[in-house]
Amino acid sequence: MGAVPLQFTFVTSAKRHADLPASPGEVAFVGRSNVGKSSLINALANRRQLARVSNTPGRTQLINLFTLPGGGTVVDLPGYGYAKVPGRERAGWQAMIEGYLLEREALEMVLVLVDGEIGPTRLDLQMLDWLRANGVPHTVVATKADKVKPSKLATRRRDLAKACALDPGDVMWVSATKGTGIDRLQHHVQMLLTT
Ligand code: GDP
């Protein structure tokens, strides 16, 4: 497909989307903590240190923005569903994310990460319902494909898509560890940000 690593440059972290720099077009990654978001972003860039940027203490709860050479931007939204986060902080997270998703003009597509091994959690389904209800364009990306036995993959694909109320062909499967589906997703992001 001719996809090449996405040449991310880390630009900034912000607490509010209003503090982000303007962008001609943006793709955002969202998912519960531990879904494999940092690993995936690193795999897309074919680099290791980007995860460190987003996982630096103090930055995990912020909106992290990266630019690509063509001018488009990629946003790593804070992971949701930390077990021990108090209600007040959760409410803050929600306001931050919802504000970003509803008001960020440059936003072209939200990539919603779902753990391919365990399927969508209650919080993932809430996020998908919310995106649908608000008409925010989104694509489900199933992570950790390598954790599913090849003999189970077809069934798993069908079940995960069904649980998300999607057709199997609408879900992109990736493995950051094995590199599966990475070139396709690189291509997808490039297409979204160049059209
Ligand atoms: P984040 O919290 O969403 O940023 O998740 P991380 O990228 O830090 O990954 C969470 C855990 O899942 C780590 O232990 C990773 O090594 C593991 N992980 C991430 N991607 C994959 C994958 O594609 N395959 C497998 N087997 N493990 C993965």
Image (cartoon, rainbow, N blue to C red):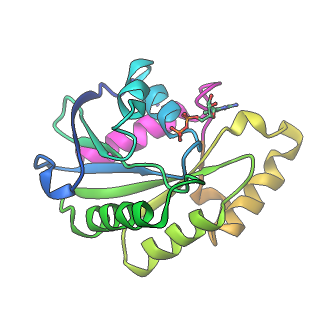
Classify the position of ligand 1 by quadrant: top left, top right, bottom left or bottom right: top right
Instruction: Give me the residue at 37% from left, 42% from top.
Output: 189
Relative to 113, does residue 73 appear above or below in the rendering? Answer: above
Q: Nearer the viewer, residue 170 or 114?
A: 114
- Left-right relation of 106 to 164: left
Q: Residue at x 21, y 68 (%)?
A: 103
Q: Position of residue 96 (x, y in %)?
A: 30, 61
- Of all residues, the one furthest to the left in this rendering is 22
> Can you see residue 2?
no
- In the drawing, does residue 102 fall left or right of residue 82? left
Question: Is residue 67 highlighted in magenta?
Answer: no
Q: Quadrant of residue 106?
A: bottom left
Which one is nearer the viewer's eye here, 192 or 55? 55
Query: Is 122 situated left or right of 97 in this image?
Result: right
Identify which residue is drawn at 51% across, 56% down.
Answer: 85
Residue 125, how many percent across, how many down? Answer: 59, 69
Measured from the top left, where is residue 83 in percent x and y? 60, 54
Residue 46 is drawn in which quadrant? top left
How many numbered discs sit on the rendered protein? 0
**Residue at point 41%, 60% (across, down):** 89
Give the image location of residue 24, x and y in percent. 14, 49
Judge whether 122 appears above or below 182 on screen: below
The answer to whether residue 177 of the structure is visible from this angle is yes
Q: Which residue range is magenta in the image?
A: 174-195
Answer with left or right where residue 192 lies relative to residue 32: left
Q: Looking at the image, is 98 positioned above or below residue 85?
A: below
Whether the magenta-drawn stretch holds residue 190 is answered as: yes
Residue furthest to the bottom in view is 133
